[in-house]
Amino acid sequence: MKKLTTATLLAMGLCCQLQATDLFKPVQETDLRLPSVPLVTSDPYFSIWSPYDKLNEGSTKHWTNDEKSLIGAVRVDGKVYRFMGKQALEALVSMAGSEAWEGHYTFDAPQGEWTALDYAVNGWQKGQGAFGTNDMPAVRTGWNTKDIWVRREFNLNEIPANAPIYLKYSHDDVFELYLNGEKLVATDYCWRNNVVLELSDKVRAKMRKGKNVIAAHCHNTTGGAYVDFGLYTTNQKTVEFENAAIQKSVDVLPTQTYYTFTCGPVELDVVFTAPMLIDDLDLISTPINYISYQATSTDKKAHDVQVYIETTPQLAVNEMTQPTKAQVIRKNGINYVEAGSIDQPITDRKGDLISIDWGYVYLAGKNGANTSVSLGNYADMKAAFSTQGELMAGRREVITRKADEMPAMAYMEDLGTVSSTGKSGFMMIGYDDIYSVEYMYERRMAYWKHDGKVSIFDAFERAKANYQSIMERCRDFDAMIMKDAEKAGGKKYAEICAASYRHVMAAHKLFTDKEGNLLFFSKENNSNGCINTVDLTYPSAPLFLVYNPDLMKGMMTSIFEYSASGRWNKPFPAHDLGTYPIANGQVYGGDMPIEEGGNMVILAAAVAKAEGNADYAKRYWDLLTIWTNYLAEYGQDPENQLCTDDFAGHWAHNANLSVKAIMGVAAYSEMAKMLGMDEVAETYMTKARNMAKKWMEMAGEGDHYRLAFDRPNTWSQKYNMVWDKMWGLNLFPGVMEKELKYYLTKQNPFGLPLDSRKEYTKSDWIMWTASMSEDMETFQQFINPLYKYVNETTTRVPISDWHHTDSGEWVGFRARSVIGGYWMKVLMDKMQEKQ
C-alpha cells in the first residue's frame, strides 16, 4: 500500500486543515497483519482487541482473552450488515465464570480408561469448578498439587443440528482434554484463557442425547494452577445480525486503527482512536476512546443508512456471575448508558489474568436529533434495529444477577440518505474506575481526574467538543512516529512500531502521589501481575526516553522513594511494588540484585542524557551510589541469582548480566561527569573499563562470547551492551561486531533465539541486539524474521514478546509493556544525533 499525500505533507511539517473524509483514511497504509488488533485501549483494565483477521470474525476480547463484546452493524436500505464482533454464544455446558459446575476430581493418577463415558469414578472426590489456586478467576475448588484429573458429566436434551458447537477452555499449565473419550486438546507447557475450539463433524458424531462427559488432566509446572471448560453454540435469538459485511482493509497506526467494509451498495469506514498522545498527560490518562464511522454510496445512488454499536455490562465485571446495574442517564445535553458491578469492590481484586470489577463503563454519542442510546433486552434490541432502523425504547435501569440476563447497551445514529459524498459520525466509549491503584496504603485517582476536580462527564464533554482537533493531532502524531521509525529502521520496522504503540501505553496507569510526583505504573500482564516491575521498566524504556522522559521518571521515582523511605533497605532496588493494582511494597519471591541495580542506574543515566542534565539523578545520588557500588563489587562474575530472563533458567556466572553491571558502573560515571564530579567520574569509568577488559577474557570463545563464563560451547544475546554503542564509550571494543556476525548464523525463520539453551526468544531483546548493527542492512536482517513472526504467528493475542523462533507460536506473555523496547533503534539514532 502507498502513502497518501496527507502523510507527505505531515512529514514535511506542513500544517493542513483536514476535511471530514480525510479522517477516515490512514496517513500511511500498512501491510502488517497483527495477531490481535487494538480497538479500545486505555489501561490494563480498559482494553479491547480483535484477535482475528476480520473484525466481524469473532467476539472482541480483553487482552486476557476474556470476552468483552463490542458489536457493530450498519443498516442499508433495511438490510443489516454486521461489521464488528459476533453475538454472544449460548451455553450448553457453562464455564465457571457464568455459573458453578460440578465434577469429580482426583490428585492421584487414575487407573483404567478414565476418559471413557462409562468410567466408574470410585475414590474420586466431588467438587465445583473451576479448579485452581486462589489467584485464578472463579475458583471454587482449590488445587495446589502437581496434577489434577477432572471428569464432568452432563446431560443434553438436544444436540444443535444446524449450528456450530464450540469447546471453550482455560488451563495452567500442561493440559489434555477429551469429549466422550475423543482427545480434543493436548498442549505442552503453556497457560491459556478462554480458548474457543469449534467441534469437528467427527467429534459431534460422538455426542449423544442424555449423558456425555468431558475429562481433563492438567499438570502444573510452576506458579498458578487452573482448569475450567464448557460447551457453547450460537445464540439463535440474534439471527438478525448474522449477515457479515465484507472487510476490504485494516491499517493499524500508533493511535488509530482503520477498517473499511463493503455493505452492499455502501462502503463503510470505521476508525478506532485512542488519543494517547505521549506528550499530553491528560489525554494519555483520560479513559475515553472514539469510534468514528463514515458511510459512502458506491453505486451513484442514494441509500438509507443507520449505524449501530453495542456492548454489555460484561465490560465492568471480572466474572459473568457478578451482579450488575446499568442505567440510562443524561448530563449537560449528553445521553449515556452506564453500567457497573453492584458490589463495587474498589481496588480490591488483584492478580494477573483478571478484569476490573469496579467503576463504570459508559457509551455516549455526540447527541442530536438522529442519535440515540438505549438499554434493554439483548436480542430484542437487535431485532428493533434490524426491523425498524431504530433502538427499542428500552428501560431506565436494568439489574442482572445471571450471565444470560445481561442487557444490550446500545448506541445508534441514523445517517439518513447517503450519497457518494458520504456522511460521518462518531461515538465515545469510556470507563471511570473511580480509584485506579492503592499506592502506599492510599487509594489514588487517575491523573486526568486531578484529585477529583474533573468528573467523567466533564471528560466526555471535553472529548466531544475537541473531537476534530484531537483527531487531527492523532494523525500528526502517527505520521511523526512512522517517519521516525522508518528513517531509523525501514518500512517493516515502522509498521512493527505502529502496531506496538497503544499496546505499550495501555499497559500502564498514570497518576500522582500525595506529594504531586508523577507516577506511571505498568502491570506485568500475563507474567505474574506485579505492579511497576523494574525489569519491565528497563526494556520498555526506549519509547519513553525518545518521546517523554517524564514518563520514564514516573516509573522510577516510586522505586527510589521506596528505598529512601527505609521500607526497602537492601543495597539494590526492589523488583516491584506489589500486585496490580496494589502498590504497597515488593511481593516477588526472589530478589534480582544485579538485574534491578543495573536497570535503575543505567536508566537514570539514560534519562540524564535524554534531558541533557543529571538533575533527576542528583535527587537520588546516595541511592545510586549504594547500588553502583554493589554492581562494582558483585557484578564482575555474578553468583547464581535471578535475572529478567529467569524463565530460561538462571545460571551463575551469567555473562550478559555481568555486562549489565559493567554498564551500570559506567552509567554512574557518566552522570557524575554531568554533575561536575570529575574525580568520581574518572574513578568509576576506570572500574568499568577494567571490568570490561576482564569480561572479554572470561567470556571469549573464539568467534563469539559465552552465555556463562564457565560454560563452553554456549552463547547468548548480549543486549545489555547496546548502551556502550549508544553512549560511544567503547568499553567492549570489537565485541558487538563479532557477536552480531555470530548471531546471524543462529537465526531461525521467526527470529534469533535468546541463547543456546532453547529455540525461543524475547523480541524486545532482539530489537536491542539489532540496534547494535553497524548498518541498515544488518539491522534489517534481524528485523525481517520478527516482522514475519508478527505477520504470520497463529497465536492470536496482542503481540507476545516471548515466542518460538522455529514455529512462530508464542510461549507465553502478551500485552506487556516491554515491547516499548522496539523503539531502541529510534532512541539510538536520536542520541547519536545529539553527540
Image: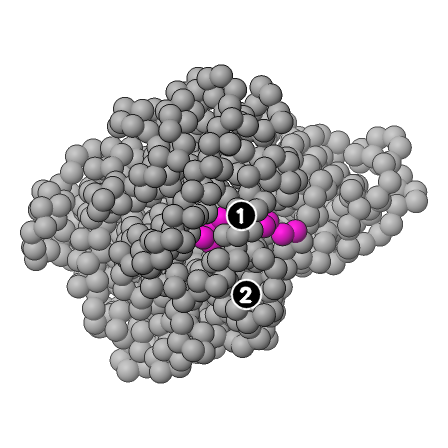
Q: Nearer the viewer, residue 688 or 74?
A: 688
Residue shown at 17%/63% (left/top)?
Answer: 468
What is the tally of numbered marks visible in this picture?
Answer: 2
- Closest to the observer: 639 or 529? 639
Q: Which amino acid does label 2 sit on?
A: Ser
Question: Would residue 525 be visible to someone looking at this image?
Answer: no
Picture coordinates of residue 280, whole percent (x, y): 27, 64
Could you tell me which secondary element the residue under label 2 belongs to? Answer: helix
Residue at the image point whose x is 56% and y is 55% from the top: 572
The magenta-colored residue range is: 590-601
Residue 536 located left or right of residue 566: left
Q: What residue type is labelled 1?
A: Leu
Name the front one of labels 1 and 2: 1
Q: Name the residue under label 1.
A: 631
Crowding at label 2, few (<14), some or many (≥20) Cα neighbours within 10 Å? Answer: some
Q: Is residue 517 visible?
A: yes
Residue 739's disc is none
| Figure quadrant of residue 438 | bottom right
Q: What residue is shown at x 33% (from left), y 64% (from top)?
A: 615
